[in-house]
Amino acid sequence: MEHAFEIAGIRCDANEIRLRGRSVEAQFAPDAAGPLTDAFSNNMAVAFLGASAMNALYSVDAIETENGACRAVFSMH
């Protein structure tokens, strides 16, 4: 399954995703931190471009960057 998101108008591919109820936790390469920060700061909706069952709009709830990776938590709307 493809793990692609459209974040602040930029396609970002997640290395891994985990579903947690109505939330999604995703791991990205460090270059996704910029678009994720934009979306978080400006309350922008994020689109999941992978499985049709998960097609919905999400908001960015949290971002962590450490050890050359970027982790984000999204909530479904």
Image (cartoon, rainbow, N blue to C red):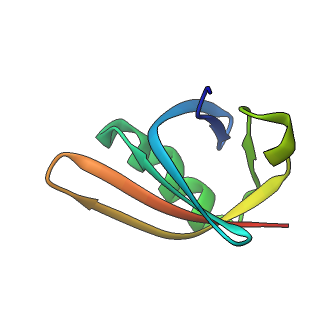
Q: Say which of 23 and 36 sits in front.
A: 23
Residue 16 in the image: above or below residue 44 = above
Q: Quadrant of the N terminus?
A: top right
Q: Please indicate whether residue 75 sits to the left or right of residue 53 in the image.
A: left
Q: Please indicate whether residue 62 sits to the left or right of residue 41 in the image.
A: left
Q: Residue 18, image x and y in percent?
A: 53, 56
Q: Residue 2, image x and y in percent?
A: 61, 26
- Residue at (51% x, 48% y) in the render: 17
Q: Quadrant of the C terminus?
A: bottom right
Q: Say which of 2 and 74 sits in front.
A: 2
Q: Please indicate whether residue 30 sits to the left or right of residue 26 in the image.
A: left
Q: Residue 63, image x and y in percent?
A: 43, 65
Residue 61 in the image: above or below residue 49 = below
Q: Quadrant of residue 71?
A: bottom left
Residue 40 in the image: above or below residue 9 = below
Q: Quadrant of residue 24?
A: bottom right
Farthest residue toward the left?
Answer: 67
- Residue at (47% x, 60% y) in the render: 72
Q: Please indicate whether residue 57 sits to the left or right of residue 21 in the image.
A: right
Q: Say which of 73 and 32 sits in front.
A: 73
Q: Residue 15, image x and y in percent?
A: 41, 36
- Residue at (76% x, 34% y) in the render: 51
**Number of callouts in the render?**
0
